[in-house]
Image (cartoon, rainbow, N blue to C red):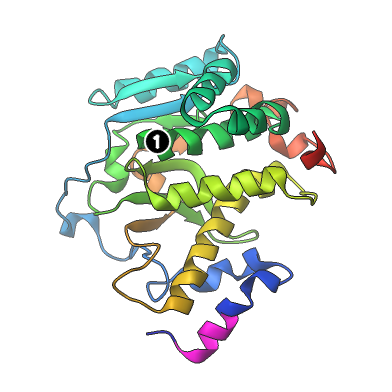
Amino acid sequence: MFIQEEKEKAKYFKFSLHPQDELEQYLNPRFLSVINEEISIDALQPVNTNIPKKIVIFWHEKDLPDDVYASIEKIKRYNTEYYVELFHTESAGEFINSHYGQELYYLYERRCVHPSMKSDFFRICYLAKMGGIYIDVDINCFKSLEEIFKFYEFDCFLFYTKGKPCCIDNDFIACKANNPIISAVLDKIKENLTIKRSFSSVWECTGPGAVSMAILELLMQDILQDDQENRSLEGLRLAPHKFALRAYSHQELEYKKTTEGNWRYFRMPSQLYKL
């Protein structure tokens, strides 16, 4: 049961100046299914998660730089039970057009104006239909990705990062097909690509900012409805980003040093919705 103060806050959530700033206070089991970091995995038994045995990766060009190629080969080496599928700008666009039609393809082609935006949009489109695992290419994989989540029952597994900004990340996603949480994230990105407002960064428009807002909005619905048996976020599991270290570490690849490769160096158009 949620108290009246929590319901009032949920009611006016969208009118908050910086609603994402409120995320950290909700990262506890009262509101979201956050994994207890203090419980050792030695005390846990693996469970069957029923996640499709697919790993999807995006690289905007057909030709892979040597360090990107090496990263993907390591992912394959340690995840032999998974089919690893690599998409590039054109093949990702073809997937979106085939499964979603011209409207979403237009948003992908015209309004995702940086490779990172195309990657953000595509991964959610793919997972919403197919399920499986999405992983960024800038990793050093040294164990199966299942080591991250195999002890937990879930329909959708995401990392979160505390700090400034606090966010729910999109660099690693594991989910079942047709998951309503991933569908809500897709709806939020579609909204951001069509709404008449400006965005400060790729992060805010199609990246972790969009993921965080979609989940926060679902949470506000759950608080207002206060129905413990029919929650929008049922099946979501959130883990601190350090759980990634069970299977991989991050590495700074060469592409991160370029404007095309690093969204942080990119200046968002002020009127994206007109493109």
Residue span colored magenta: 3-9
Whether residue 268 is visible to the viewer of this picture, yes or no, is: no
Q: For mark 1, does the 10 Å Cα neighbourhood hold few (<14), some (14 to 19), or many (20 or more) residues?
A: some
**Magenta region's main secondary structure?**
helix
Whether residue 270 is visible to the viewer of this picture, yes or no, is: yes
Residue 231 in the image: x percent, y percent? 36, 67
Q: Is 241 positioned to the left or the right of 113 in the image?
A: left
Residue at 43% across / 77% down in the picture?
225
**Quadrant of the image occupied by residue 145:** top left
Residue 75 in the image: x percent, y percent? 37, 25
Which residue is more in the foreground, 112 or 170?
A: 112
Q: How many marks?
A: 1
Farthest residue to the right: give it.
270
Farthest residue to the left: give it.
45
Residue 148 magenta-highlighted = no
Q: Is 73 positioned to the left or the right of 102 in the image?
A: left
Q: Is 188 positioned to the left or the right of 250 in the image?
A: right
Residue 8 magenta-highlighted = yes
Amino acid under disc 1: Lys
Residue at 51% across / 31% down in the picture?
100
Residue at 75% across / 28% down in the picture?
259
Q: Which residue is mark 1?
A: 129
What quarter of the picture does the C terminus occupy? top right
Residue 40 in the image: x percent, y percent? 25, 60
Label 1's element?
A: helix
In the displayed structure, would residue 79 be above or below residue 221? above
Residue 244 in the image: x percent, y percent? 40, 44
